[in-house]
Amino acid sequence: MEIEEEQGVNSTLKRVVISSTFATGLFIATPHVAEAALGDQTLRTGMTDSDVKDLQDALKQKGFFTYPQSTGYYGSITADAVRKFQQKHNLQVDGIAGPQTLSKLLAEMDGQVPVVAPVPVKTVTPAPTPVNTTTPSKITQTPASTSKLAATTGLIRVGSRGAHVEELQQKLKELGHFRTSTTDYFGRVTEAAVKEFQKANGLKVDGIVGPQTLSYLMKEALQETTPVYQPEIPVVQEPQPATILKIGSTGAAVTELQAQLRSVGVFHQQPTGYYGEITARSIREFQKIHNLTVDGIASAATVAKLKEVATNKATTPTQSPSSSSGALVTNLLAEAATLIGVPYQWGGTTTAGFDCSGFVQYVFNQQGVSLPRTVALQWNSAQAVSTPAVGDIVFFATINDGPSHNGIYIGNNQFIHSGSSTGVTISSLSNSYWGPRYLGAKRF
């Protein structure tokens, strides 16, 4: 597991946070105090946060951030701006706004983050959309001029009370998330409705109405009414791929990504399923080699290139199972061969010592294939085959009638396994000991 340590910036630095809220359905910049201020956290590629917007504003004032406007999303453009700032001030050039970088930037700003004037926005009124008169669909909306919710600048959470809470509940009710009578108190029912709304809109699910949740809520409320007002000049954000893996991502997709990076020689440890700095560095190295945008994010272009060159491609609808499994088998045998001579250890699952199922599990895990721990579970979860092929698992009954030992078939009637008296070695299925005890082969 990759562990990242963060150091806080000196708390004596002065900070000003610029956030945003929605008024009259349009994005208007207005200063207020948020949960954190620039300097309270390390900022890096992939993050979306009000602190990122403050960072962009500061870098823009100093001439490093050249995008037309700050977005709040930390993409490759922001990372490049940070690198330029770091290079100028003899800091470590990594594109990450860590404690030293933020401290220097705040010192350059005399502790103050600039207020960047919002881009002037005009509104246009499109032709009214015809409404089916037999099925009313228009939702009553609180006029922006009297909206207590739109004027809210603080966090709205459990324990909050007032007219803005009742308006929040009403909007959630109109959108189908709040299913009881409105009150002026933010309790657990309101919190559950907020979480449901956040989940439906791909937001951080914490049940707290902050600037981002509020902005989405106001947009959704506007979209449910007619006419719909839209800015003539849209708010532009740095482009993001539809589905990406980045720092903080976890799961099987990350494990597969790491296994593929390992197969091309840029990831030098076992897959963990967690996307941290080590994985990001490996991605940057891969991107540099293949002339891709070097940002440490596994974007669609990066993943496509990696799948093209990796030696352990996963089976996908665009790949034939035979070609992907062939690469997997090659890697399995290569990995297993490097372990010959490792001693036997009861319960062992590492290169310090293996038992039979621990050895099989380890070899498959190195290629991003997750297997159960014990012989019995491996036997029960795999598919039986009549004749073993290279890469299949062969099973033996050494204690009773059921499977109690196994190994990986390598062809020519031979298999590699961790024997209790031999450690990792190669044996023959025709051996006078193993032959009579052979139960069959199974395939993952």
Image (cartoon, rainbow, N blue to C red):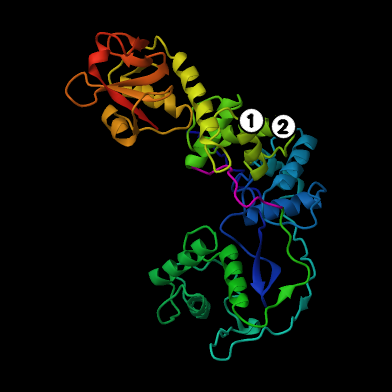
Residue 5, how many percent across, how many down? Answer: 54, 36
Q: Which residue is at a point 38% across and 32% down the rendered structure image?
A: 371
Taking the image as shown, residue 1 lies to the left or right of residue 18, namely: left
* Dot 1 crowding, Cα within 10 Å, few <14, some 14–19, many 20+: few
Q: Residue at x 65, y 50 (%)?
A: 241
Residue 315's spot in the image, x, y percent?
52, 37
Q: Which residues are magenta?
A: 239-250
Residue displayed at 42% across by 16% down = 411
Residue 354, x across and y down, in percent: 34, 18
- For residue 37, say whether it is visible: yes
Instruction: Please identify the residue farthest to the left as the structure is shown.
Output: 400
For the point 63% across and 46% down, the residue is 43
What's the mark number on residue 290?
Answer: 2
SS at circle 2: loop
Residue furthest to the front: 386
Snapshot quadrant of residue 387: top left
Most foreground residue, 97 or 142: 142
Q: Is residue 286 left or right of residue 415?
A: right
**Which of 212/358 is in front?**
358
Q: In the rendered image of this protein, does residue 268 appear above or below residue 54?
A: above
Residue 348 visible in the current orientation: no
Q: Which residue is mark 1?
A: 309
370 vs 67: above or below: above
158 left or right of 138? Answer: left
Q: Which badge, 2 or 1, is on the more N-terminal residue?
A: 2
Q: CB under 8 Å between callouts 2 and 1? A: yes
Which numbered dot is residue 27?
A: none
Image-based side of 254 in relation to 101, left or right: left
